[in-house]
Image (cartoon, helix red, strand yellow):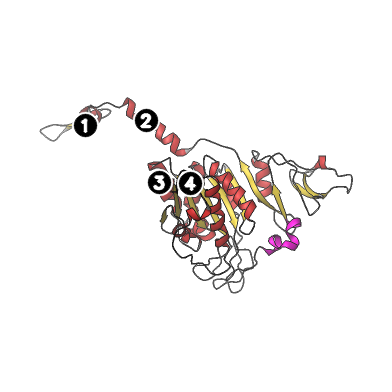
Amino acid sequence: MTDAAKPSPKDYASSNEVRWCPGCGDYAILKALQRTLADVEAKTEDVVFVSGIGCASRLPYYMSTYGFHTIHGRAPAIATGIKLANPDLNVWVISGDGDALAIGGNHFMHLIRRNIDVQFLVFNNEIYGLTKGQFSPTSRVGTRSPSSPKGCIENPISAALMALGSGGHFVARAIDSSQKQLIDTLTRAYHYKGTAFVEIYQNCLVYNDGVFSSFTDKAVADDMQIHVEHGKPLLFGKDKNKGLRVKPEAMNIEVVTIGEGGISVDDILVHDETNKVIATLLADMREPEFPVAIGVLFCKPGHIFEVEIHKMVENETSEATCNLNGVLRQGHTWTVTENSDSERD
């Protein structure tokens, strides 16, 4: 890239052949990432993509940036090391629902609670695609797979709820096929300082095709998706005549229709992305009773781990003595005498 020309998505594409199954949702996410970096005019030499193991984790090969294809579930740990070594780098963590929430669940939790300045994207297709379709931590009860031929009996993890419960400061959702909304969300994540967690619903055409069709199909999308925006009423439906309101008798939310039972726009809950209670209620909504919440559910900046670490190091080094002998002998020490007895100073 040259400084004179505005970058294009092609500037962020590597020369490697993209190898995912035809029709995989990963293609759309890759395209959105390349467009996002072009829109924000990121310098390729300042960007690092770090991934674990799985279909999604091939993504660093397809970016003309720095990248690490690391080990199963440990991408957050590698990303933490990169950010501590060079805080000026823009680091993206790419993971799937199995990689991030099963073997990587521990690393997922601690990256988010520390609020390290990275973008953490989880491609959620509710299945293990690379290892031929076993059920994953996000698979729904009843999912039939090679590892659950009679149907999965485990309760699924909600990635967004797990991020919020781990102390996440930025939690968002997007859909692979909704390019504009996905790019807008990735752009918000890019500019956020701290861990920006984005769960992306991604279709696996081979092993779990159509698992999200109940809210992504065009015929139902208007009624089964609610796109949240800070400061705006939580309305949805083709005519925007449905909305969410707080139940008068309980600290919960319900779907209402404007014009029915005296309901007006004034009764509709206004999205406050700094309110964790609202974010948790939105993240917990499930179809068909509720629409699926898409967009930035929660955004409330906090102190950033690597910034605080470097402050601590600077304070310690500025006050440290150059007398190594004095440092080694400070505090409680032991003096060994000639007869092997010791006495404590």
Q: Earlier in the sequence, mark 1 or mark 3?
A: 3
Q: Say above or below: 52 vs 279.
A: below
- Closer to the camera: disc 1 or disc 4? 4
Q: Specify which label sits upstream in the sequence, 3 or 2.
A: 3
Residue named by callout 4: 111
Left or right: where 180 falls relative to 86: right
Camera-near label (4 vs 3) is 3
Please tell me which of labels 2 and 4 falls first in the chain. Answer: 4
> Residue 334, which numbered label?
1
Q: Is residue 249 magenta?
A: no
Q: Residues within 10 Å of mark 2 (few under 14, many from 20)?
A: few
Name the amino acid type tagged 3: Ile
Q: What is the magenta range?
A: 211-224
**Amino acid beneath label 1:** Trp
Q: Where's residue 180, x and y in %?
A: 64, 52
Q: Secondary structure at mark 4?
A: helix
Q: If you read the primary sequence from the N terminus, does the residue marked by circle 1 or circle 4 appear first?
A: 4
Residue 248 appears in view: no
Q: Residue 314 — which label?
A: 2
> Which label sits in the foreground, 1 or 2?
2
- Circle 1 Cα neighbour tier, 10 Å, few/some/many (<14 / 14–19 / ≥20): few
Query: Label 4 vs label 3: CA separation?
Result: 13 Å
Which residue is under mark 3? 82
Q: Gap between marks 1 and 3, in whole Å?
A: 39 Å
Does the segment drawn in magenta span residue 213?
A: yes
Residue 158 place in picture, x, y as percent = 61, 54
Dot in front, 2 or 4: 2
**Three-letter residue code for mark 2:** Glu
How far across and how far down the image is residue 116, in percent? 48, 42
CA gap, disc 1 and disc 2: 31 Å
